[in-house]
Image (cartoon, rainbow, N blue to C red):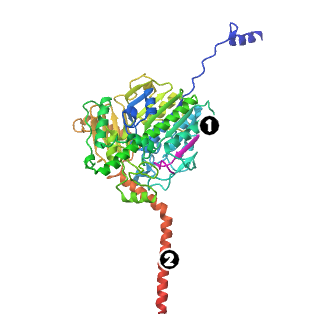
């Protein structure tokens, strides 16, 4: 017995003092993932854009700013990949429901919801003790069991739509009857003083302050800036008076020059020409120039307003002692939005019925439906070509910033990275964990070795990054890229580019390098078979599909009224006929 006691004492005491204890396990970092909607590669100040984004710029200065990060060309597939680490076709959200062709409806990978076996980052982090929080745009399924709570989020205030008004609780396009907001998967209303960026941050700070203050958290903020309708408080818009008065041609050239100065593109790289059907700025009447310059001012103001509220979130984390142990991610789901709101009389009629205007007076404020259109989208995407919807660099090459606990400070990363890499990177920083029961494996790669300077790249010269959304596709391998863009802004032809010399995608090398063309084509064929790509039908046009889906939705929505109106009209006509016959008989 004495020997046992002595052994116990010896275990806890050394020379009469407590034995040194092992260092406590390092605290798991908090994660704040912020996704901007439709931001171009150079929109943020840290990348050389006109918008004032000092808070995001500060995050970039103390972390890593990526110059070759790729997303998908549309919002839902990008968000599905970011949250799961899996290719979009494997998640069930291959594209967005608004552009889904009839032939693909309900097919595996095209159900427009996260399918069984698809685990989100929230579901993977919860077993590690994380509180999981989400505010903003969801757009990953609308049926029972499709909203955030069903996919691992403890608290959420989510918009289940591609967008909505930023000032009011209402729809922004005929496809939707209203703005479907949910809190913890239950229909919810917005406050009277709602502005999207402010509300998304306020709600997240409320959720952060609930529950166990010692538990790490995963916070996913999906901003509505700068999705249409482009709207911003006038005090932010006013900061850009005159900035865009020279027009889209001048702005595009200026961003191209800044890109060369910063080394994003070679000094002798060509700028892609404007499409022939796009309007030269000088061809617009003076009044129309004022309208379009004002719209771009609102766009920059909306980015600044978002950054202002990001700053409030950062200050809140500092004041509560959680900032130093937080990892931040800032990115965009795809490139800039080219859609216009002033060319379709049906859309104009819908706007009139729903309290929207396109006027200069009050641009960007409540009731305004502002947009930037295809020419400004081309300018915003500079030094790259094209924009959202397409597999061109302007559609898929977007800003990506990571900074915070455990990461290096103040570096620029020129290595390739992909949206599926975000989830495995954050999971690795959290210490990893077992696969959830029945979960399909991630397809992305951890960027941790790259962020910590342990390697120069996680994708070698023989590794291909492949992207496909609604027929718009890209295969990026080493310096080369094979890409295809569908109607209405492309022609569905494959083209080959050398991105190291021609990031503007101006010179098709398909005929000059047939062996490289064939190699990347083989990569695409293997990828397509592996993930279950369904090719779009001949003549597919995303704009036509949006119109078709909107008309179908409206017919379904108003069918009871149309039927009721038809019955009432028939009754009136029958009554008139009956009355006429009676009078005729009396005569």
Q: Is residue 3 visible?
A: yes
Drawn side of residue 513 relative to residue 85, left or right: left
How many other residues sit within 10 Å of disc 2, few (<14), some (14-19) or many (≥20)? few
How many other residues sit within 10 Å of disc 1, few (<14), some (14-19) or many (≥20)? few
Question: Considering the image in quadrants, where does the N terminus appear?
Answer: top right
Drawn side of residue 249 relative to residue 426, left or right: left
Q: x%, y% of residue 491?
A: 29, 48
Residue receiving disc 1: 210
Q: Is residue 267 above or below residue 370?
A: above
Q: Nearer the viewer, mark 1 or mark 2?
A: 1
Residue receiving disc 2: 571
Q: Is residue 159 magenta?
A: yes
Q: Is residue 446 visible?
A: no
Residue located 43% across and 29% down the image? 60
Q: x%, y% of residue 318?
A: 55, 29
Residue located 53% across and 32% down the image? 315
Of mark 1 and mark 2, the one earlier in the sequence is: 1
In the image, 11 versus 260, the foreground residue is 260
Magenta stretch in the rendered image = 154-168
Label 2's element?
helix
Q: x%, y% of residue 242?
A: 34, 42
Q: Is residue 458 magenta?
A: no
Q: Residue furthest bottom?
A: 587
Label 1's element?
loop
The answer for how far apart the CA atoms under marks 1 and 2 are is 59 Å
Residue located 39% across and 56% down the image? 547
Q: x%, y% of residue 233?
A: 46, 44
Q: Is residue 524 above or below residue 446?
A: below
Quadrant of the image occupied by residue 548: bottom left
Q: Residue furthest left?
A: 512
Q: Residue furthest right?
A: 1
């Amino acid at each position: 017995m004495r020997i046992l006691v002595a052994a116990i004492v010896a275990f806890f005491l050394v020379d009469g003092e407590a034995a040194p204890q092992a260092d406590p396990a390092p605290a798991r970092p908090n994660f704040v993932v912020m996704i901007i909607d439709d931001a171009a590669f150079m929109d943020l100040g840290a990348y050389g854009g006109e918008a004032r984004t000092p808070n995001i710029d500060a995050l970039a200065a103390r972390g890593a700013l990526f110059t070759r990060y790729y997303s998908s060309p549309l919002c839902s597939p990008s968000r599905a990949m970011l949250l799961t680490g899996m290719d979009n076709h494997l998640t069930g959200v291959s594209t967005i429901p608004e552009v889904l062709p009839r032939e693909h409806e309900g097919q595996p990978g095209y159900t427009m919801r996260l399918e069984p076996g698809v685990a989100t980052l929230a579901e993977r982090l919860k077993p590690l003790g994380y509180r999981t929080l989400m505010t903003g745009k969801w757009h990953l399924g609308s049926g029972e069991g499709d909203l955030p709570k069903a996919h691992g989020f403890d608290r959420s205030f989510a918009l289940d739509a591609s967008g909505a008004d930023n000032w009011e609780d209402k729809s922004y396009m005929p496809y939707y009857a209203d703005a479907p907001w949910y809190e913890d998967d239950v229909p919810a209303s917005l406050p009277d003083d709602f502005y999207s960026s402010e509300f998304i941050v306020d709600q997240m700070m409320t959720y952060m302050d609930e529950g166990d203050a010692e538990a790490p958290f995963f916070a996913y903020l999906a901003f509505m800036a700068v999705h249409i309708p482009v709207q911003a408080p006038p005090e932010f818009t006013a900061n850009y008076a005159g900035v865009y008065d020279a027009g889209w041609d001048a702005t595009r050239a200026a961003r191209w020059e800044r890109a060369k100065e910063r080394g994003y593109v070679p000094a002798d790289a060509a700028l892609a020409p404007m499409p022939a059907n796009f309007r030269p700025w000088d061809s617009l009447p003076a009044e129309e120039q004022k309208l379009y310059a004002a719209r771009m001012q609102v766009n920059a103001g909306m980015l600044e307003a978002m950054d202002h509220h990001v700053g409030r979130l950062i200050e809140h984390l500092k004041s509560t002692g959680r900032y130093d142990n937080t990892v931040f991610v800032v990115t965009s789901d795809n490139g800039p939005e080219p859609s216009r709101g002033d060319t379709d009389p049906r859309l104009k009629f819908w706007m009139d019925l729903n309290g929207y205007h396109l006027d200069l007076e009050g641009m960007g404020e409540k009731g305004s439906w502002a947009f930037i259109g295809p020419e400004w989208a081309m300018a915003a995407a500079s030094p790259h070509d094209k924009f959202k919807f397409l597999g061109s660099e302007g559609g898929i090459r977007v800003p990506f910033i990571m900074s915070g606990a455990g990461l290096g400070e103040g570096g620029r990363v020129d290595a390739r990275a992909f949206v599926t890499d975000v989830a495995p990177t954050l999971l690795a920083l959290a210490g990893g964990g077992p696969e959830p029961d029945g979960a399909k494996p991630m397809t992305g790669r951890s960027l941790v070795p790259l962020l910590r300077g342990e390697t120069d790249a996680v994708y070698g010269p023989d590794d291909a990054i492949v992207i496909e959304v609604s027929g718009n596709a890209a295969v990026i391998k080493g310096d080369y890229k094979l890409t295809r863009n569908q109607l209405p802004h492309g022609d569905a032809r494959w083209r080959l580019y050398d991105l190291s010399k021609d990031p503007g995608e101006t010179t098709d090398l398909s005929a000059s390098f047939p062996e490289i063309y064939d190699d990347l084509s083989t990569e695409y064929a293997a990828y397509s078979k592996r993930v279950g790509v369904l090719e779009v039908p001949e003549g597919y046009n995303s704009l036509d599909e949006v119109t078709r889906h909107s008309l179908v939705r409206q017919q379904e929505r108003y069918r009871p009224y149309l039927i009721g109106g038809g019955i009432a009209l028939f009754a009136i006509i029958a009554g008139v006929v009956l009355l006429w016959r009676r009078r005729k008989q009396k005569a």
